[in-house]
Amino acid sequence: MEPNPRMKWLPWVSTPVVLVLVLVVWQLAVSVFGVSEFTLPTPAQVAGALGGLLTDATTWGHIAITLAEVAVGFVVALATGVVVGVVLGRAEWLERALRPVLVAVQVVPKVAFIPLFVIWFGFGVTSKIIMAATLAFFPIMLNVMLGVRSVDRGHRDVMLGLGAKRWPTFRDLELPSTLPYVFAGMEVAVVFAVIGAIVGEYLGGSEGLGYLVVVSLNALDAPQLFAVIFLLAVLGCLLYLVVNGAKRFVIPWHESVLGADTP
Amino acid sequence: MTRGSHAEAVDDVGTDGAAEEVAENAELELRGVDKIYRARSGATTQALQDISLSVRAGEFISLVGRSGCGKTTLLRILAGLVSPSSGQVLTGGRDLWQGGRRDLAASARFGLVFQDANLFPWFSVEDNIALPLKLRGVDKRTRRARAAELCDLVGLSGFEKSLPRELSGGMRQRAAIARALSYDPSILLMDEPFGALDALTRDRMNLELQKISVVTGATVVFVTHSITEAVFLADRVVLLSPRPGRIRSVTGVEFPRPRSLDVESEPAFQDVVRRLRHELDEEGG
Ligand SMILES: Nc1ncnc2c1ncn2[C@@H]1O[C@H](COP(=O)(O)OP(=O)(O)OP(=O)(O)O)[C@@H](O)[C@H]1O
Ligand SMILES: [Mg+2]
């Protein structure tokens, strides 16, 4: 319970230190060891490219598109994942019947389906949303299924002993004990959704940060490529922080929140 | 399965002719109850064998016996949390299992304290204690007031807003007791509720429980490993023998209730304790 007070500030110091170290090594690699600026631009060049991108309105358009794809795909995955997870978690026979299919679908690299999605849904945002949703669906569904089954026996006995009806049992027991699993799934899923959208954009289309990566690559513009990748990293981090923040807000009682005072 | 197969067990102790009279207006009654657990592997455990017991309204029964002899199972059967493999469970003269389904109306009268505290980690102590009231549709204000009252009773004042994980094991157990008391149940089924408490707190809780049972007239079935505690609290002490769990003896404790802690030093009291301890020892094995 009690977080070690000496550890609390540690990441706030260590993170900048690591960042500075990376920048120094990076700069040294270019200026001292003579790595070609074509393959590795200097930090200053990347910063310049980043500045250029951020002052360009079309970049913000690309960011908005990617963000929208990820968000919609994630929400679709959340809704379907929770519903399917609850159904499969409750109906054990159904899960057993579908298990081979589920495992098969899960182990297939879903990125391989993107060309199919492009054929079916075109080069627009729809195919990217579907890709993001497909990738994000499984971690949520699997976690919810596990969560529904992991309601504590003793807690069930309490509700049973009180003669609780279906709805109160759901509201006061099943929902709160499943929520940590939902959030665990969401934390993985949001990262997957970003991957799905980006890879979708790599393979087809004319908008989004993934598309910008492809454009930079085709122009052999290494600084801009680095800058876009940096933007993607920031986007991923922000989305993760949103989910994590929501978790801290919704289930402040859970160990993953209480125990995680040191990020 | 009928009653009477324990005539010899019941005879050698002080229940006298009271047994017949009790059967008439029994609050809780088990008739020839067996419980066989079937493990997934197909192996079976006979946890209880031919248990017949009737508990009068307002009576305090202590249940003692070695670990694994079926005390928890017996309590869960009384509460209707598990069904007996054979035999009958009656509450207030009505069968608890109406056509294979548990009688929900009857269960509303039970207050259960489990061997584990089983508090919900997402609720504060206060919300845990008031959960039964919430399920009964009591408004928030009343719930809070009642929770504060009960926190005071079990010595948890000041911890109303704490989460269960911030409490010690004994404090959690006390919160669980408060939860069971929150709606004034007429039947209390308690499974080693004071197991995690220190001797002083335990004495205090024993007195508190005795007071509650005397004042509210609640019927109590109380599982404990402490023979002294069992004798101090009970009208009758039921001793289970293990594998399979059977009623080995029923011992009446004649001291009028409520009792003060002083009875524990009386020779007659110590006599009962010694006899029970001896019996428990004999099971040995
Ligand atoms: N759910 C279960 N499935 C299978 N066997 C069980 C189950 N619950 C209890 N048993 C078995 O039934 C027997 C009695 O168990 P029970 O929990 O009633 O004992 P107990 O008297 O409460 O023990 P303790 O004092 O240690 O709490 C044990 O042998 C145990 O292995
Ligand atoms: Mg037990």
Image: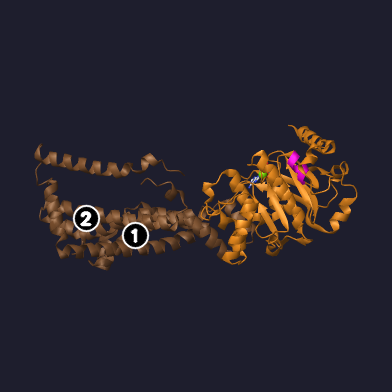
Chain colours: A brown, B orange
Q: Residue A254, how many percent across, how many down?
A: 46, 51
Residue depicted at 12% across the width and 56% down the height: A218
Say whether residue B177 is left or right of residue A48: right
Residue A6 vertical position relative to residue A160 in the rendered view, above or below: above
Q: Which mark is residue B90?
A: none
**Which residues make up the magenta segment?**
B228-233
How many marks on residues?
2
Q: Which secondary structure, mark 1?
A: helix
Q: Which residue is mark 2?
A: A231
Specify the principal SS of the magenta part: helix
Q: Which residue is mark 1?
A: A134
Q: Nearer the viewer, residue A106 or B257?
A: B257
User: Quick one: label 2, few (<14), some, or many (20+) residues within 10 Å?
Assistant: some
Furthest-right residue in view? B17
Q: Nearer the viewer, residue A232 or B112?
A: B112
- Judge whether residue B231 is colored magenta: yes
Three-letter code, disc 1 = Thr
Disc 1 versus disc 2: distance between alpha carbons?
A: 23 Å
Residue depicted at 56% across the width and 61% down the height: A169
